[in-house]
Image (cartoon, helix red, strand yellow):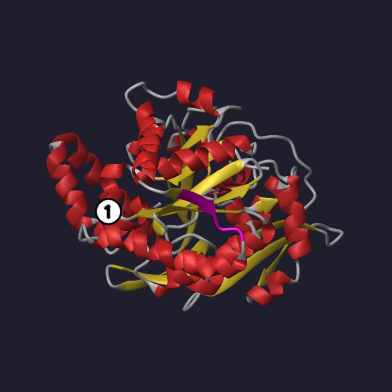
Amino acid sequence: MGYEVAPTACESMSAHQLQIDSPLPAASDAPVSVRVYGHWDDLAEILGDWNSLLQRSAKASIFQTPEWLGAWWQAFGANKELQGLVFTDSDRKIVGIAPFYVEQQSTVGAPVKFLRMLGAGSGDSDALDFIVAPGNERQCANAFVSWLASQIAWDICALETLRAGSLVARHIAQLVHQAGWRTQSETTPNFFIELPPTWAEYLDTLEPSFRPLLTRYPKRLQSRYRVSMTRCEGPEDLDHNLQTLFVLHQMRWTGQGEPGAFATPERREFYSRMARAFQARGWLEFWMLQLEGETVAAQFCFRYGGTVYLLQEGFNPKYAADKIGYALRAHVLQEMIRTGADRYDFMGGADAYKSRFGACEGSYLTLRFAGPSRLGRLDLALREKKREIKSWLKRKLPERVLELLRSGLNRPAASIQIAK
């Protein structure tokens, strides 16, 4: 399977490319109905239909699977209200699934209820979307917006990190625009490598000055240490390797005054649940590098269709001069090419190092809108003003000052993004 992040390999889509007024593919006008599931166990009863819908979509991502979203909900679902929407046609056949949750935030001291897609909000999920049978995007969007209009228990609906080419998002954007609801859209970058058939072809795509980090330095490492690189194959090794990953990651970031991605028990629980589920499905690509028998670097990836996603990594700073992170990534990339993967996805974030590996830039779309709620419209207005101020500062202030502001004002969010 896999999915397309951008229209072409190295194009990104701007927020204005929603093309609200442009023609959309023709679809049946037959209406669909919405059922709401309030408990995960109820959603688990339709796993067959869920997986069938994913298999029918060439653009489905691993972040839409019940394995990912189930583990996420079990870890992060406390104090949240599940709103699992299931769309059925006139024959009561399931044609779409969209798991949401409701959480309360605060705007100018007043409580605001957000309706968010399951998986959003923790900094872990990318490429979220409605799970819809091809040809039913418009009907599901119509049913969703009609359902929203009949509800009072929400102030803002947030569709976050959607695929930039999402048909459902385009239909919803048109509908809420026609309804006169206040909307806000933005894009965020992601980077991915389109993997060629051979390792030699991949190396040829890199800058000559960067290539030795993936060729010469790993050989030098072999000359200095007894080196082993292994994949976590069995459930008996998973817990130990996860704990090693947590320690290696935290060792680096806490040493720089950052909290690190694994500072909370919720994220550690999420990784444990998700890794077990992925390993059982054969999706887990969890690699370790050992020097003299000691694990000094780890890379936590998973594969879905032809795409390999890098979610997390860590290494012992003691060996930074030996470029162990580069050695492990080079080995993983070689293995992914050898075993037929066609994409290595760095996921969200504009970290400069990704381009050096030959990555192309794509984008994710976030669409927020408020219906009749005054608090919702106020919250969106404040967000827009904040974005305008940031844009002004970016144009007016020197880059060094901007970096200081980012590190001081956005420390928690930044640590999660960098962790990816």
Disc 1 residue type? Pro
User: Relative to 91, is 413 on the left or the right?
Assistant: left
Q: Residue at x 64, y 39 (%)?
A: 339
The correct choice, above or below, for 38 with respect to 342 in the image is below
Closest to the observer: 178 or 382? 382
User: Relative to 134, is 211 on the left or the right?
Assistant: left
Q: Quadrant of the N terminus?
A: top right
> Within 10 Å of the Cα at label 1, are there few (<14), some (14-19), or many (20+) other Cα atoms?
some
Name the main secondary structure of what is drawn in magenta: strand
Per the image, label 1 sits on a secondary structure element best described as: helix
The correct choice, above or below, for 29 with respect to 153 in the image is above
User: Relative to 60, is 53 on the left or the right?
Assistant: right
Q: Does the stretch in magenta take in 80?
A: no
Query: Residue 104 at what x, y percent from top left?
Result: 42, 72
The correct choice, above or below, for 133 with respect to 413 in the image is above
Closest to the observer: 324 or 305? 324
Closest to the observer: 158 or 151? 158
Query: Residue 18 at what x, y percent from top left?
Result: 51, 37
The quadrant holding residue 416 is bottom left
Closest to the observer: 120 or 237? 237
Q: Which residue is mark 1?
A: 317
Q: Does the stretch in magenta take in 232?
A: yes
Q: Which residues are magenta?
A: 228-233
Query: Residue 9 at what x, y percent from top left?
Result: 53, 28
Of all residues, the one furthest to the bottom in this rendering is 79
Q: Residue at x 83, y 62 (%)?
A: 92
Q: Residue at x 29, y 50 (%)?
A: 319
